[in-house]
Amino acid sequence: MRIHLGGSSRQSLVTARGQLDAAVKGVTAASASELSSELFFASDVFAKNTSLRRAFADPSRDVAAKSALVKDLFGKNLGAAAVSLLSSVSTLRWSAGGDIVHVLEQLAIEAEASAANINSELDVVEDQFFELSRTIAENFELRKALVGSGTPEAKSALVTELLAKKASASTVKLAIALISSLRGRSIEAGFADYLFGLANRRNRLIALVRVATEISAAQKSRLATAIEKQVGQPISINVQVDPSIIGGVSIKFADDLVDGSISNRLASAGRALVGQN
């Protein structure tokens, strides 16, 4: 993975992503984007407050106390979805307090990626963000202006001007968030972290379907519709023909596997027979 987290924090990121999936299920692009803004705000709050990070990373601190602290800090400024997600994240375990900042930033990136996905723009945003990273890396004066001592407002205006008229609103928003919150990273490392978040959200919105023989376009469309209804977001389907599964279908989506293949049923039956003997 691009960001380096300790064992507990790494698992907490996995859990938090599942919670984000639930938070953006069935919402509008505007709602997902608003959640992203609020998570970026929370990440900045934690980045600027060492004692707050220590309080949340302290495993001996009561879970209820952490949730109450979240409501005290953010209840009046953030929406219910963000507060609920932050309360859930507060109950997780952390290898270091600073990891909370990185995880919240990743969730913010992925929430905006979900907004782009709802607008059918996720691939476009990912491509535009990569191209922007290359443009900055290859232009010394531009890079100097964005990492120098200029005000955040001036840097944001420069990014907006650079991307104006040709970039998605999600691309502009993420670029401004990155430039405004490098937090000691090189700009190249910042782009790598953001591209990691975009790629991860895209990967979570791809269903790998294994079948014994080719399926028709109509079957693929019906399958996509069924999965999208369950997920509450547009998804992509990659179909893999694998004769070894004999028949049926196996679907891998995000962290879930639904294996209805005949080979799996036979294997399960064989294990059951062995258990009876």
Image: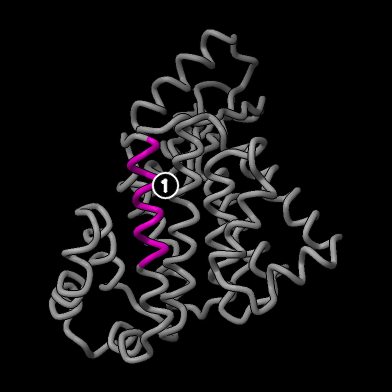
Residue at image position (57%, 63%) is: 178
Query: Which portion, as a residue range, is magenta?
Result: 29-41
Q: Count the marks.
A: 1
Residue 90 in the image: above or below residue 217? below
**Residue 101 image point, x, y percent:** 44, 74
- Determine if the magenta segment contains residue 37: yes
Compared across the picture, whether 109 is left or right of 57 comes to right
Q: In this figure, which residue is indicated by the disc labeled 1? A: 274
Q: Name the residue type under label 1.
A: Val
Query: What is the image's colouring?
Result: one colour
Percent position of residue 174, x then y: 55, 54
Q: Is residue 270 magenta?
A: no
- Crowding at label 1, few (<14), some or many (≥20) Cα neighbours within 10 Å? few
Can residue 235 be seen here? yes
Q: Nearer the viewer, residue 60 or 160?
A: 160
Residue in the image at 44% along x and 58% along y: 108
- Left or right: residue 72 versus residue 186 is left
Task: Name the main secondary structure of what is drawn in magenta.
Answer: helix
